[in-house]
Image (cartoon, grey):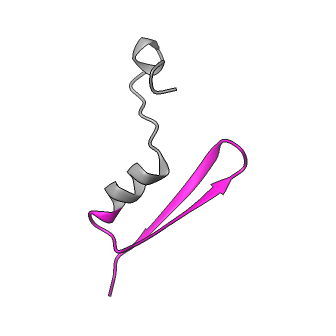
């Protein structure tokens, strides 16, 4: 998908992998969880530590 997006006229979209999202969110949050929703979506939840 990411290889195709530069050729799309739909806008600037970046699809992140789970590892990328965990790394990005882990910069500011200590607790990051990830779960799949259906077959095409995921939800990432991040919480600040105490």
In the rendered structure, the answer to whether residue 40 lies left or right of residue 18 reads right
Q: Position of residue 45 (x, y in %)?
A: 49, 65
- Residue 12 sits in quarter: top left
Q: Is residue 9 left or right of residue 40?
A: left
Image quarter of the C terminus: bottom left
Q: Hey, which quadrant is residue 47 in on the image?
A: bottom left
Which one is in front, 12 or 32?
Answer: 32
Tell me where residue 17 appears, x and y as whole percent: 47, 45
Q: Say above or below: 39 vs 2.
A: below
What residue is shown at x 27% (from left), y 66% (from top)?
28
Furthest residue toward left: 27
Q: Residue at x 62, y 46 (%)?
A: 41
Residue furthest bottom in the image:
50
Provide residue 38's location: percent of width, then percent of height: 72, 49
Instruction: Say whether residue 29 is magenta.
Output: yes
Whole-percent x, y for residue 43 in the image: 56, 56
The furthest residue to the front = 19
- Number of numbered callouts drawn: 0
Task: Check residue 34 for magenta coloring.
Answer: yes
Q: Which residues are magenta?
A: 26-50
Q: Residue at x 46, y 37 (%)?
A: 15
Q: Is residue 43 above or below residue 41?
A: below
| Relative vertical location of residue 46 with respect to residue 5 in this rendering, above or below | below
């Amino acid at each position: 998908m990411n290889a195709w997006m530069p050729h799309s006229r739909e806008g600037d979209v970046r699809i992140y992998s789970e590892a990328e999202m965990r790394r990005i969110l882990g910069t500011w949050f200590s607790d990051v969880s990830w779960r799949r929703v259906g077959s095409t979506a995921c939800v990432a939840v991040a919480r600040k530590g105490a």
